């Protein structure tokens, strides 16, 4: 089992920044990939960004050039730096880990961007 705990969400004005953190209970280098997803009210959960075990990153088109995913393997933590936030970024953000085809999810952290 892998526990994931997100933090860093909150209320921010449009154009502002937030950094989300996802602390894992196991070595993040043992994960095939880790990522951030989000779900807005009435919408399906969507991929935001992922990072593989060898450091390759992938982003949704809607967040490219604004969001950056990174990791600190010593702290078993993955981050999502979010800049130039827009009201449409408002959602619950979930951390995800893929280890040996098992998927794990955090409890989510709310991000609200006011206009």
Image (cartoon, grey):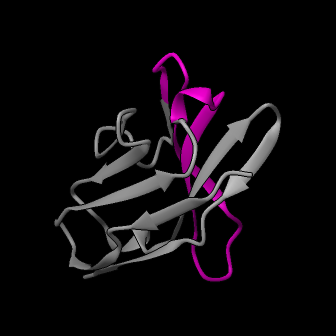
Q: In this rendered view, identify the residue nearer to me: 31 or 8.
A: 31
Q: Residue furthest top?
A: 54
Residue 29 in view of the camera: yes
Indicate the quadrant where residue 30 lies.
top right
- Classify 2 as above or below 73: below
* Percent coordinates x, y for residue 68 in the rendering: 32, 40
Residue at the image position 21 percent from the left and 57 percent from the top: 84
Q: Is residue 102 left or right of residue 71?
A: right
Q: Is residue 51 visible?
A: no
Q: List x then y, in percent, for residue 99.
A: 72, 35
Q: Which quadrant holds residue 70?
A: top left
27 left or right of 114 in image: right
Residue 35 lies, with reference to residue 105, above or below; the image says above
Is 34 colored magenta in this rendering?
yes
Quadrant where the C terminus is found in the figure: bottom left
Residue 38: x and y, percent? 56, 63
Q: Residue at the location (67% across, 73% down)?
A: 43
Q: Residue furthest right?
A: 101
Say how many tags the image has.
0
| Residue at figure coordinates x 41%, y 46% from the top left | 77
- Left or right: 55 as drawn, with respect to 75: right
Query: Looking at this view, is 81 or 54 the one in front?
Result: 54
- The relative height of residue 100 versus residue 90 in the rendered view (above or below) is above
Q: Which residues are magenta?
A: 28-57
Residue 80 in percent (x, y) is at 36, 50
């Amino acid at each position: 089992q892998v526990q994931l705990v997100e933090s860093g969400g909150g209320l921010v004005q449009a154009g502002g920044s937030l950094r989300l953190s996802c602390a894992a209970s196991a070595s993040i280098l043992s994960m095939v990939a880790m990522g951030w997803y989000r779900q807005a009210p009435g919408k399906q959960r969507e991929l935001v960004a992922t990072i593989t075990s060898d450091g390759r990153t992938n982003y949704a088109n809607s967040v490219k050039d604004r969001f950056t995913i990174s990791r600190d393997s010593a702290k078993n933590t993955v981050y999502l730096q979010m800049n130039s936030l827009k009201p449409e970024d408002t959602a619950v953000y979930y951390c995800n880990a893929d280890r040996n085809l098992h998927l794990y999810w955090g409890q989510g952290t709310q991000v609200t961007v006011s206009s």
